Amino acid sequence: MEQQHLETLLSAVARGDISPSLAVRQLAQSTLEDSLSGLTLDTQRAMRTGLGEVVFAQSKSNEALLGAVSGLHQDGSPVLATRVSPEQGELLTQSFPQGRYWPMTRLFLLPQRLPDGSSAAPLELGPPWPQQGDILVVTAGAADIPVAAEAYGALRFWGRSCGLITDVGVAGLHRLTPHLPALRAARCVIAVAGMEGALPSVLAGLLRCPLLAVPTSVGYGVGAGGRAALSTMLCSCVPGVAVVNIDNGFGAAAFAAKMVQAANGADGDAQSAG
């Protein structure tokens, strides 16, 4: 929103011409347009939905990618970009040296700009990862870690309490046992699995909390591309399992973040602004 428009809106509230709630609704609909790169940035999405706009880097031109990140960061807000290629990561790191690119997760995180003009400390996405939190991400195998780490990184960006437990799939189910206390204390679990995709059903049969299943494109033959894991998860006989798209760690993180936020009520809404 342009400064002049914002000042006009706030002056109208001060005069009593419009109510504060109407002003909030108008602010929530404001966008930032960049005709040169074809962008219409939804700068107030967090006000409406609880989660701010995230930049999807895949298939974007360099101009559009830089325009999106700089536009969302113009007021000092932190910015998250997903599905960032190594070449795009290098471009963003050069353009925004205060940011951080994690090739494994394909995430680029630009920290908040502080009032004194400096930047907040960049997030560290590990490893080692914490193995407890309100939201726990669990992988069946080590090959599933990139998708799981994408979910973990997004949750960290949104300020959620989260952890990441890796390589505890059904090929060696005894590996899950030491983590059961932390899993049972979690408010939501994201289970990430390729191959036959059995781990979400196992976890859902052990835990009280909601479970989100993420199929990955890890596997051989008919399992390649993640469709076998997707079918297994959609056909789970255990109630309380929701399934997102193949390799969609970010989507699972967004759903889990909003679920916990809704459970928190007003406190969660206030926390999401960070």
Image (spheres, rainbow, N blue to C red):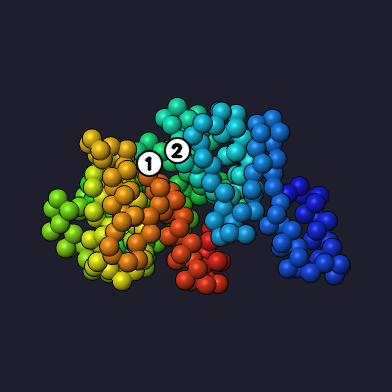
**Circle 2 residue:** 83
Classify mark 1: residues with Cα within 10 Å, few (<14), some (14-19) or many (20+): many
Whichever of labels 1 and 2 marks the residue nearer the N terminus, that label is 2
Q: Quadrant of residue 70?
A: top right
Q: Quadrant of residue 173?
A: bottom left
* Left-right relation of 251 to 39: left
Q: At 71% from the left edge and 61% from the top edge, which residue is drawn? A: 25
Query: For the residue marked with disc 2, what is the amino acid?
Result: Arg
In the rendered view, would you say 11 is above or below 92? below
* Left-right relation of 141 to 21: left
Q: Quadrant of residue 226?
A: top left
Q: Nearer the viewer, residue 219 or 255?
A: 219
**Circle 1 residue:** 105
Query: For the residue marked with disc 1, what is the amino acid?
Result: Thr
In the rendered view, would you say 231 is above or below 239? above
Mark 1 lies on a secondary structure that is loop
The percent position of residue 122, horizontal first and vertical second, equals 45, 46
Tag of residue 143: none
Q: At 64% from the left edge and 53% from the top edge, which residue is drawn? A: 44
Q: At 60% from the left edge and 32% from the top edge, which residue is drawn? A: 64
